[in-house]
Amino acid sequence: MAGAGTKRVLALVAAASGAVVLLGCATGSWPARSGKLRVVGSDTMLPLTRLLARAFEAANPGVRVSVGGGGSAAGIAALIAGRADLCASSRPLTAAEAQQLFQRHGRLGVRVQVARDALEVFVHPDNPVRALTKLQLKGIFTGRIRQWEKVGGVGGTIEVLIRPPSSGTHAFFRAVALDGEEYAPFATVIETTAELVELVSLDETAIAYGGMSYRREGVVAVVVDGAPPTPEAVRSGAYPLSRYLYVITVGPPEGLVKGFVDFILGPQGQRLVAEAGFIPLFDTKIQ
């Protein structure tokens, strides 16, 4: 049986895995104006983190920010191992990850909301399907619906493309769209969202999902449960596949890390969130 001390740690871990921290962007100055920052994590957020890193460097010439992808799980693992100062993540820490962080650093992690995202479902422009229900999505991605004609399309077997298990997007779509059920065993795993979108643009039988910033010419985002993936539908809660995006730190941000987090949450950072194709936390036009 676990001792009282172990039970206390596990209770803290469970609480931390669900905690959200939204830091103010004007909570004090940060002392360091030079140094290096390492940001690793979500491929969905990669265009945004790169944009933020370059702008932060431009505002602070003595600072260098390295940015890496690999998925939310890889970023969290790098944070735990001490190979990253911040993790960009499209999902919260799991209880197991929070426990590992506590065992390594004596901290449970701080999760900061930095943007909102609509997880879009992409099809080829020649595919006549423009709207699906969540029930139909669940049928398609679990493999129970195999033919496009079953959901209003023309004849043809549906080619299902998904992100790898290391991706926070993979986990979010499975939890929300599939109600936790397993993906179809025949689904093709694609490492990055950019590759996934490219494949959909080349195959009119394909279907896939990805962050809203990856929509481009050659693919169409379908309406889900009667709602399009627009900022208005996300903010109102009408679009069912929406989420927050985060940066995660080991403890309360300090020094250069705090400066970067404050920058993201400030007016310039939130304007870059919109520029990258995501939804800012507040209306940047009134700032």
Image (cartoon, rainbow, N blue to C red):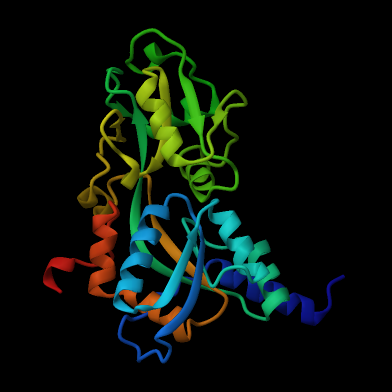
Where the C terminus falls, by quadrant? Answer: bottom left
Relative vertical location of residue 16 with respect to residue 159 in this rendering, above or below: below
In the displayed structure, does residue 115 sit left or right of residue 166? left
Residue 85, percent from left and from top: 54, 73
Residue located farthest toward the top when viewing the structure as drawn: 155
Pick the residue in front: 272 or 133.
272
Pick the residue in front: 151 or 217.
217
Residue located farthest toward the left when viewing the structure as drawn: 286
In the displayed structure, does residue 48 sit left or right of residue 19? left
Residue 155 sits in which quadrant? top left
Pick the residue in front: 60 or 89.
60
Query: How many discs appear?
Result: 0
Residue, x 39% and y 76% (percent of image)? 260
Residue 283 sits in which quadrant? bottom left
Can residue 264 be seen by looking at this rendering? Answer: no
Relative vertical location of residue 279 with respect to residue 27 in this rendering, above or below: above
Residue 213, percent from left and from top: 32, 47
Residue, x 30% and y 45% (percent of image)? 239
Pick the residue in front: 281 or 239.
281
Residue 209, percent from left and from top: 42, 37
Residue, x 29% and y 52% (percent of image)? 237
Relative vertical location of residue 150 with respect to residue 60 in this rendering, above or below: above
Can residue 75 be seen by looking at this rendering? Answer: yes
Residue located farthest toward the front when viewing the structure as drawn: 62
Residue, x 49% and y 16% (percent of image)? 146
Residue 278, percent from left and from top: 30, 54
Where the N terminus falls, by quadrant? Answer: bottom right
